[in-house]
Image (spheres, helix red, strand yellow):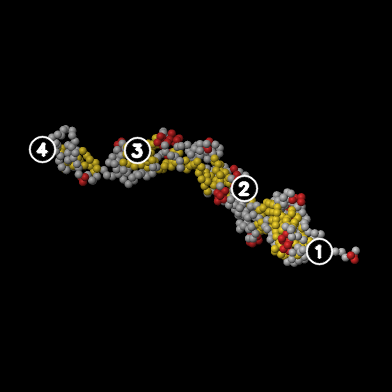
Amino acid sequence: MLFNNSLIGSAKSVTASGKPGDLVTLEIPSGLWEQEGIYNVQYLATDIGGGLSKASPIIPLVIDRTAPGALLLASLIFPQQAKALSQQDIADLGGTLTARLPGYFDAKWGDVVRTYWGAQPGPTHTVQAEELPAGYINLSFDQPFLDQLADGEVLVTYTVTDRAGNVSVVSEPALIKLNLKNHPGDLLAPVVPQAQDGLIDNADARRGVQVQIPPYTHAQAGDAIKVSWGNLSLGEHTLTLEHATQTPLFALAVPYATLISAGDGTIRVSYQVIRDGQLQATSPDLEVKVQIRLPGPQDASPETLVNEALAPPVIKGKSDHPDHDDNLLDEEDYLLNADALIAWREEFSACDQINLFWGTCPTPVTRALNQNDIDAAQDVVICVPNRMIVEEGVCRAIDVRYTVTHPANPNTAYSPSQSVRVICRAQLPGGENVLAAPQFAEANASNTLTPDAEAETIRLVVKPYRNMRAGDRVRLSFAGFDDFVAGLMLEAASTAVEQTVTEQELLQGCTFNISAALFRAIDVGRAEARYIIDNNYGAAHSLKADAYVDCRPAALTCALDPKLM
């Protein structure tokens, strides 16, 4: 082997079996071609017998270890239309988008230019010798290639690989925007039906606020619609084939919590159209006026009309009962005014108006809060006039509730209801009259009970009374005393029993059979009895019945003096 006219390596002998055309392999040691350059390579054949030699023609060997373009490749130069390339633009360009590749360092014929559209490989181009003198190279991208790309912005780059296999750095990117797939257009502002009267109030928010999306040109199934309520997102909604052909395209419900978070005031509502993950268009804004905050505390559970953040009213009677129950107006309270207590809430403000509704009465009792109320921060007391109580009448469960309003707020807060029991004397057992005392059925003409040794029970009778109904509960108490007048109560001679009125007793009254042993425990003294009757409206107390008790043996009959006859 001759390398730059110098013999290198070892000679190889042609074997006796060798024939013309057989290949002989000679090696060039690596140390001779590590440096870039052009080397003359040939071989020398020598006849062993005569010693004559002859050299082959020279072959130039190019050693190239430098990548094309060195450290920088300029970006491709696209026509102006590529800033927003549409189908019409491609048609105007003759169906092909052409980019100019500027000249680069060490450009040679045979270099291969590979393009990249984002991460997707694009067409390649092999540099021809006749292209080099111009100082630039034209790269063409036909419509079938462009049509399979996703719309949106894309960075186009390229690399150059020379004949030696050296690969260049990646070029500077060129930004183009593709709008080839029927780009969405002619977007209209969204529609909010509840705002068409000029205001979205709390009642609208509870019933449900909708954002409707009008049709736009080139709407396609798969388009993602991203709706914004002020600065809050309502999420993305993907168009179906059915949506794309209807008016409106679809409607989104705005959650109550979103309305509260966005706050009151003028809210801008808009939407964006996203296709293949790329933002395509943004609608004009719709301005809506919102006022949904309630007077007083806010409602954490808007699914119901009632604002659970408000406490139900507490009704207190004004009679002198020491153990008066809340939310119960008995027969004495029925004749008086009542107090309604409204539990204080720190969110109350001056000029808030509390409107108390009693049963079916359409006109509330109104109490406006002032600054003194705010400073005191105490439960609010509202007088319920007796007129209102009497007009509504009596019931086991009169519905009492209140609302909170404010002059500058169109919204109304509704409290939970309170069931109030109202009783008048006319409905109680006995009606307007006091219940009669029970009767000792075995008392003699001198109102004395003298049970004999064989008697097992002594009867106490409760006569029929006004408003008597089956199911009334009669509770009888019996007590014995050790003297005809006053005396001490005898525990062994006292008891309490009860029974429920039956249909048969409505005409004849109720009979209680008291054990005669209780009377014998008295021996000589007296017995007292009274009863209480409960019905659906309340309880009434009877008068007291008493009788003398004498369990001593009977005295002999007194004989008349003959002198007196």
Q: Mark 2 — residue?
A: 203
Q: Nearer the viewer, residue 335 or 527?
A: 527
> Considering the numbered disc 2 on the image, is that residue within a helix, a strand or a loop?
helix
Q: Residue 565, labelled with which disc?
A: none
Q: Earlier in the sequence, mark 1 or mark 4?
A: 4
Amino acid type at mark 3:
Thr
Amino acid type at mark 2:
Ala
Q: Position of residue 419 (x, y in %)?
A: 67, 53
Q: Estimate the spatial distance between the alpha carbons at disc 3 and disc 4, rounded to whole Å.
A: 53 Å
Q: Nearer the viewer, residue 221 or 444?
A: 444
Q: Estimate the spatial distance between the alpha carbons at disc 4 and disc 2, rounded to whole Å.
A: 115 Å
Q: Mark 3 — residue?
A: 124
Tag 1 near tag 3, CB within 8 Å: no
> Considering the numbered disc 3 on the image, is that residue within a helix, a strand or a loop?
strand
**Residue at x 60%, y 45% (from the top left corner):** 207
Q: Earlier in the sequence, mark 4 or mark 2?
A: 4
Q: Estimate the spatial distance between the alpha carbons at disc 1 and disc 4, rounded to whole Å.
A: 184 Å
Amino acid type at mark 4:
Ile
The residue carrying pointer 4 sits among few (fewer than 14), some (14 to 19) or many (20 or more) residues within 10 Å by Cα, namely few
What quarter of the picture does the C terminus occupy? bottom right
Q: Estimate the spatial distance between the alpha carbons at disc 1 and disc 2, rounded to whole Å.
A: 92 Å
Tell me the mark number nearer the camera, choosing from 1 and 3: 1
> Considering the numbered disc 1 on the image, is that residue within a helix, a strand or a loop?
loop
Residue at the outermost left position? 50
Q: Mark 4 — residue?
A: 48
The residue carrying pointer 2 sits among few (fewer than 14), some (14 to 19) or many (20 or more) residues within 10 Å by Cα, namely some
Q: Estimate the spatial distance between the alpha carbons at disc 1 and disc 3, rounded to whole Å.
A: 146 Å
